[in-house]
Image (tube, helix red, strand yellow):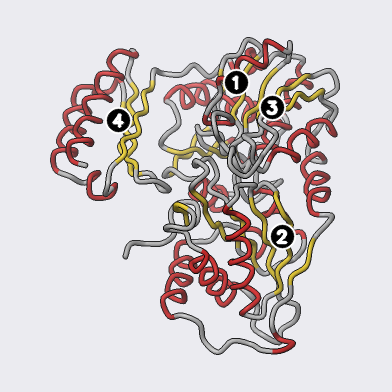
């Protein structure tokens, strides 16, 4: 059996790979590893979810696992992932659990676990939880020692006060269209932006448990691109299913990706004296254009492996204050322990309000080098990525591109997909090289 935890928790098709039985066992193992010892005081976990239908089943299973180990469960309901992380710290919980598959389609679901303080888990802690999972339950408590379940009616309001309080200026006069992906942002995002002063038009904000990420949100920007000019809005913001991502659209409907958002925020924080060590942290997937823009601005760039957990590790290790991914995971450690799409949207609009500049003007320093990304579905992502024919195709592509571009091939951390990313001086070259390597991946898969 391979490693259970991926780059962002445990994921799979709900009720097939990710079963209620696994949810129960994972909740119990996490309680044994992360909760304070029995008798040491009030032991409890924060449990939240996105609105997909299978979340109700998995929430019940995880809570059963937690309470079977004598750990109380504080149910916060449908909330963004960053809200669960924040509340884990704010309530002083032993651990937090978020049930979501983020941007994945509805049949999938996932279980993300946060340690004390709302921090994502290190690999060694995840490995220990997997070991406990394999061992099975030990002697469980009985009677009054069994954990209890209670609600948290102030959870959303508490999170909203926190993130809206981080905005350095009011957003009055700005109109924003927000696509909530029929997900966890559906109530939180419109309320946050309106509380900060913006006029809000919400789309993709009617979750029914089945329509999360379905033709909407940060993975499907077409509706948002059409809605922003139609409403005469200043910008559009798109979140994913659990609202830890944010992508944007300018007033004309042009996409402003995570690299461009990081450019805007890095310059804003530099000007405010908030950019620690004058450094931005990003991943190997970020466009070469971001590196060029930061070099022009005198800002250093630290590069990590793909995954916001690795960005977080580098931020903590260096004491840096801004990091993120091209996909729209933006992390500001002063305000949260994980990527927060709604916070990102608030800070982006605050820069517009402060400078009285359009989003297009603010993003102009970031000029993308042509980049092509192809996702190839395979049966064994790790094996295919290391196949000799695939490695040979990558080596040939690297020789062809030389110093004018780059190629990155990596297995997805959450799906049976191998990602082929190529940057080149022109779009045709990038496309041709990417498709050639992708064909080698398909053949090996």
Which residue is denoted by mark 1 in the rendering? 223
Per the image, the residue denoted by label 4 is 407
Name the residue beneath numbered marker 2.
89
Task: Determine whether label 2 and label 3 are within 8 Å by CB.
Answer: no
Around disc 3, counting alpha carbons within 10 Å, would you say few (fewer than 14), some (14 to 19), or many (20 or more)? many
The alpha-carbon separation of the residues under discs 3 and 4 comes to: 36 Å
Neighbourhood count class around disc 2 (C-alpha, 10 Å): few under 14, some 14–19, many 20 upward: many
Residue found at x 44% / y 59%: 5
Is disc 2 placed on a helix, strand or loop?
Answer: helix
Q: CA distance from mark 4 to mark 1?
A: 31 Å
- Mark 3 → mark 1, Cα distance in angstroms: 9 Å
**Disc 2 versus disc 3: distance between alpha carbons?**
31 Å
- Mark 4 nearby-residue class (10 Å; few <14, some 14–19, many ≥20): many
Q: Earlier in the sequence, mark 2 or mark 3?
A: 2
Task: Give me the C-alpha separation between circle 4 and circle 2.
Answer: 39 Å
The earlier-in-sequence mark between 4 and 2 is 2
Between discs 2 and 1, the one toward the N terminus: 2
- The CA span between labels 2 and 1 is 36 Å
**Residue 224, position as x, y percentages in the image:** 62, 21
Mark 1, Cα crowd under 10 Å, few <14 / some 14-19 / many 20+, is some
- Mark 3 or mark 4: whose residue is earlier in sequence: 3
Mark 3 touches mark 1? (CB < 8 Å):
yes
Q: Is residue 175 left or right of residue 125?
A: right
**Res 203 label:** 3
């Amino acid at each position: 059996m391979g490693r259970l935890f991926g780059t962002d928790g445990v994921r799979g098709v709900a009720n097939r790979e990710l079963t209620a039985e696994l949810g129960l066992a994972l909740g119990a193992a996490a309680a044994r590893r992360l909760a304070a010892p029995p008798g040491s005081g009030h032991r409890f976990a924060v449990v939240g979810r996105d609105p997909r239908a299978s979340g109700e089943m998995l929430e019940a299973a995880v809570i059963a696992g937690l309470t079977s180990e004598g750990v109380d469960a504080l149910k916060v309901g449908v909330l963004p992932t960053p809200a669960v992380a924040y509340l884990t710290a704010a309530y002083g919980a032993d651990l937090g659990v978020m049930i979501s598959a983020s941007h994945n389609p509805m049949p999938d679901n996932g279980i993300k676990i946060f340690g004390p303080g709302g921090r994502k888990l290190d690999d060694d802690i995840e490995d220990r939880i997997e070991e406990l999972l394999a061992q099975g339950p030990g002697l469980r408590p009985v009677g009054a020692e069994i954990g209890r379940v209670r609600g948290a009616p102030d959870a959303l309001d508490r999170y909203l006060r926190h993130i809206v309080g981080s905005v350095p200026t009011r957003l009055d006069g700005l109109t924003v269209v927000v696509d909530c992906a029929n997900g966890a942002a559906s109530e939180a995002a419109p309320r946050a932006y309106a509380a900060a002063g913006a006029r809000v038009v919400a789309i993709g904000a009617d979750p029914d448990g089945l329509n999360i990420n379905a033709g909407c949100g940060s993975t499907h920007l077409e509706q948002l691109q059409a809605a922003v000019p139609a409403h005469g809005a200043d910008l559009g913001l798109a979140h994913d299913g659990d609202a830890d991502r944010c992508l944007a659209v300018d007033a004309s409907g042009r996409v402003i990706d995570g690299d461009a958002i990081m450019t805007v925020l890095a310059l804003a924080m530099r000007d405010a004296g908030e950019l620690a060590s004058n450094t931005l942290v990003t991943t190997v997937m970020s466009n070469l254009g971001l590196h060029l823009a930061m070099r022009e601005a005198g800002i250093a760039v630290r590069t990590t492996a793909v995954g916001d957990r690795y960005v977080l590790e580098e931020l903590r290790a260096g004491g840096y204050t801004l990091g993120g991914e091209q996909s729209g995971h933006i992390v500001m450690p002063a305000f949260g322990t994980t990527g927060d799409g709604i916070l990102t949207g608030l800070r982006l609009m605050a820069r517009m309000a402060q400078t009285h500049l359009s989003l297009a003007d603010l993003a102009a320093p970031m000029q993308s080098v042509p980049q092509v990304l192809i996702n190839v579905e395979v049966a064994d992502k790790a094996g295919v990525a290391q196949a000799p024919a695939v490695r040979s195709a990558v080596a040939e592509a690297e020789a062809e591109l030389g110093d004018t571009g780059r190629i990155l091939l990596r297995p997805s951390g959450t799906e049976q997909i191998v990602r082929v990313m190529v940057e080149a001086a022109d779009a045709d070259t990038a496309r041709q090289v990417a498709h050639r390597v992708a064909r080698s991946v398909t053949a090996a898969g």
